[in-house]
């Protein structure tokens, strides 16, 4: 450390400063014309009552100067001030330390400290020390030192010095000390202060290794490094803190501790008595992760589901929606990669959570989906609805081992459905009308619902002996709506017989079970089944566990319970946009927990376009939290019709949660109805 001499030569200091101006002036042109800049001040070693000068640029904008410890000199008390120079008189209560200039552009702090002339000469000071270690100050008349102040106002009085003589002072570095300048306070009839020209480096702990990098709760973690004996506590991501008294072992080079059962993946924060904290690279906490669930959908009270994943042996219980806790002792089987369990009869659709053997709770990442219970649109004419209607009767059909038109096992809607067991790849049910053969006239669509058990399938629709119509293939174990445009069905103007044929090539070997329900005709294109929501956001009312409702912006109005038009239930949201990218239907998790998306695949909603909105685009925006980055997608509206949308979460950046959601016009005015919002 440089030698600090108490008696500064005022004239020499001023010469040095003036000489330096020629060097500093070359930088002035590079500054902004209006920027306030402090270049230098001096002299550094002064008496109280002496005059000091500040040199810089636009200094006439400085409103006050603050000297240590908190001595503020307002502009009105400056001895003189110009754009390039300020002169002040040092008050009697000023102490050694950094100087702060108050300006409209913010505070400006000096790079060096103001020192006072004192009858003390410092020859050397220990340059670096560890908290709790001693430092030595040598010099002349150092016995005048009454106290030493470390950064953060840690003051050590002479009574607490290790030793004190005319030429040497030894003092212990406080455990809470941090790197910075030291301030010396002297005794006498007029006490003075002065500071070091260089900072005392306070040694910090360092972490050189963490093992293992991935660990389970309660496992023993080892941190290697230097000066780790200074660590007083370790905080894990998630907020759990382990005090040093609970370390398994603790030395200068190593810490061992058990990972708390509440710890989350992330960096560790190492604390010491000093306010300086340290962080480590991220530590991975090993938790159960589900990757697949089958069968899906699953039938409560009937199916055994298989969950595959990793570290599933950590699961002590699963929390199923509607059914609550299912203890591991009730599982059919459990390994590290697979859990099998019977779905309780009370289970409902939703995400599955877990609790580990260490008591940590979280989402497993898979969703229990049940057979569709979506509402059915009303048809204009029924052929089958809880039995054959309107003069239709069952004929023998072919290629099946049994058929029942009054089966109650698996109705899509109501109490009954047609059940047939096919043993022929082209077997069919056959329904004949005993009345007029022109009953299809005036209708535009044939609609029915079909469910094939155990395998993906196809069907063929045929009227009398006319050409076949092939609807799209569909997936197993759930009801699907089949819509047949009559214009595409040859012979639909003169019908006396309807056949629905199985087109599954495997039917001859496995007796395919098929359920058919709700057969009828409609003039307008029918709505599809109301999409099932695993995690609703709005269905007649807001999911207030996770969301509140905002007012939107841009002149829009939002009615959250309009009974004018609904996709399902009794009310929907009516949003009237004024144009200019106004926002409406604003949901936010203000003060609440955002809605998790673990195990979900789609964000679903339905929109009905009012007059003049046809082919307009509406923009949906989401944020994972209320202040997070946003993602958006645009969809096209159909006027006078409900349209169901299912937006893949992958196209919205796969957010871990939804904390805010709103809809915007894309610079058009008009009214829409929005309903049935949630995750699938």
Image (spheres, helix red, strand yellow):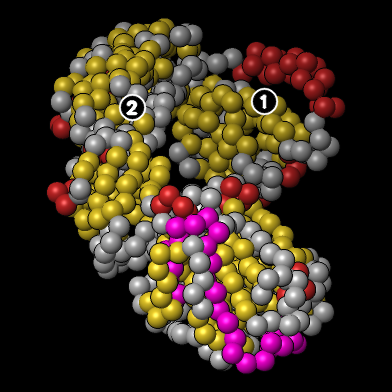
Tell me if residue 419 is in the magenta stretch: yes
Q: Name the residue under label 1.
A: 40
SS at badge 1: strand
Tell me which segment is drawn in magenta.
417-444
Circle 1 crowding by C-alpha within 10 Å: few under 14, some 14–19, many from 20 = some
User: Which image quarter: residue 555?
Assistant: bottom right
The reply to whether residue 93 is visible in this rendering is: yes
Q: Which numbered disc, 1 or 2, marks the residue that appears first in the sequence?
A: 1
Instruction: Tell me the number on the disc at residue 214.
Output: 2
Q: Residue at x 54, y 21 (%)?
A: 45
Query: Residue at the location (76% across, 20% down)?
Result: 24
For label 2, the SS is: strand
For residue 637, side relative to residue 42 (left or right): right
- Please state which of residues 346 and 282 is positioned toward the viewer in this rendering: 346
Task: Decide which of 249, 152 is in the foreground and name it.
Answer: 249
Q: Dividing the image into 4 quarters, which one contains the N terminus?
A: top left
Residue at image coords 69%, 87%: 437
Q: Residue at left 44%, top 23%? A: 181
């Amino acid at each position: 450390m440089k030698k600090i001499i108490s008696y500064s030569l005022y004239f020499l200091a001023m010469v040095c400063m003036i000489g330096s101006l020629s060097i500093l002036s070359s930088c002035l042109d590079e500054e902004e014309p209006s920027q306030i800049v402090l270049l230098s001040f001096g002299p550094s070693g002064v008496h109280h009552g002496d005059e000091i000068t500040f040199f810089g640029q636009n200094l006439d904008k400085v409103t006050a100067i603050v000297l240590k410890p908190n001595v503020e000199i307002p502009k009105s008390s400056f001895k003189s001030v110009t754009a390039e120079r300020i002169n002040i008189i040092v008050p009697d209560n000023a102490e050694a330390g950094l100087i702060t200039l108050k300006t409209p552009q913010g505070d400006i702090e000096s790079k060096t400290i103001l020192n006072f002339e004192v009858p003390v000469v410092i020859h050397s000071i220990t340059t670096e020390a560890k908290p709790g270690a001693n430092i030595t100050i040598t010099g002349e008349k150092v016995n005048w030192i009454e106290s030493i102040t470390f950064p953060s106002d840690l003051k050590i009085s002479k009574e607490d010095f290790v030793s004190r003589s005319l030429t040497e002072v030894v003092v212990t570095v406080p455990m809470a000390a941090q790197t910075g300048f030291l301030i010396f306070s002297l005794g006498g009839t007029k006490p003075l202060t002065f500071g070091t020209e260089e900072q005392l480096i306070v040694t910090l702990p360092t972490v050189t290794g963490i093992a293992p990098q991935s660990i389970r709760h309660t496992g023993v973690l080892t941190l290697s490094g230097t000066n780790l004996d200074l660590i007083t506590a370790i905080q894990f991501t998630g907020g759990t803190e382990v005090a040093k008294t609970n370390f398994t072992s603790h030395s200068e080079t190593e810490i061992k501790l058990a990972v708390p059962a509440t710890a989350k993946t992330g960096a560790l924060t190492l604390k010491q008595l000093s306010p300086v904290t340290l962080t480590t690279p991220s530590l991975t906490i090993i938790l159960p992760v589900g990757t697949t669930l089958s069968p899906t959908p699953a039938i409560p009270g009937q199916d055994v589901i298989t969950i595959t994943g990793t570290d599933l042996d950590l699961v002590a219980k699963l929390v199923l929606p509607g059914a609550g806790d299912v203890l591991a002792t009730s599982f059919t089987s459990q390994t590290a990669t697979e859990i099998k369990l019977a779905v309780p009869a009370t289970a409902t659709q939703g995400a599955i959570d877990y609790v580990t053997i260490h008591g940590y709770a979280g989402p497993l990442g898979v969703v229990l989906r049940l057979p569709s219970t979506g509402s059915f649109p009303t048809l204009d004419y029924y052929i089958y609805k809880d039995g054959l209607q309107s003069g239709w009767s069952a004929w023998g059909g072919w290629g099946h081992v049994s058929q029942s038109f009054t089966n109650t096992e698996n109705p899509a809607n109501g109490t009954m459905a047609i059940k047939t067991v096919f043993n022929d790849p082209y077997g069919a049910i056959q329904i004949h009308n005993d009345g007029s053969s022109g009953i299809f006239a005036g209708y535009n669509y044939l609609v029915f619902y079909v469910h094939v058990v155990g395998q993906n399938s196809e069907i063929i629709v045929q009227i009398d002996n006319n050409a076949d119509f092939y609807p799209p293939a569909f997936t197993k174990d759930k009801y699907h709506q089949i819509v047949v445009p009559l214009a595409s069905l040859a012979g639909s103007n003169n019908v006396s017989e309807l056949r629905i044929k199985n087109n599954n090539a495997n039917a001859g070997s496995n007796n395919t079970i098929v359920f058919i329900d709700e057969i009828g005709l409609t003039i307008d294109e029918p709505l599809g089944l109301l999409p099932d929501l695993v995690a609703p956001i709005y269905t007649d009312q807001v999911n207030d566990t996770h969301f509140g409702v905002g007012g939107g912006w841009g002149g829009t109005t939002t009615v959250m319970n309009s009974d004018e038009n609904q996709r399902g239930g009794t009310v929907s949201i009516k949003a009237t946009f004024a144009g200019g990218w106004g926002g409406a239907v604003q949901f936010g998790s203000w003060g609440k927990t955002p809605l998790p998306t673990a195990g979900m695949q789609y964000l679903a909603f339905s929109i009905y376009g009012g007059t003049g909105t046809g082919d307009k685009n509406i923009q949906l925006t989401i944020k994972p939290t209320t202040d997070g980055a946003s993602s958006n997608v645009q969809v096209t509206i159909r006027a006078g019709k409900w349209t169901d949308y299912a937006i893949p979460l992958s196209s919205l950046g796969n957010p871990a949660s939804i904390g805010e959601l709103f809809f915007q016009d894309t610079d058009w005015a008009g009214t829409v109805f929005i309903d049935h919002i949630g995750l699938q």
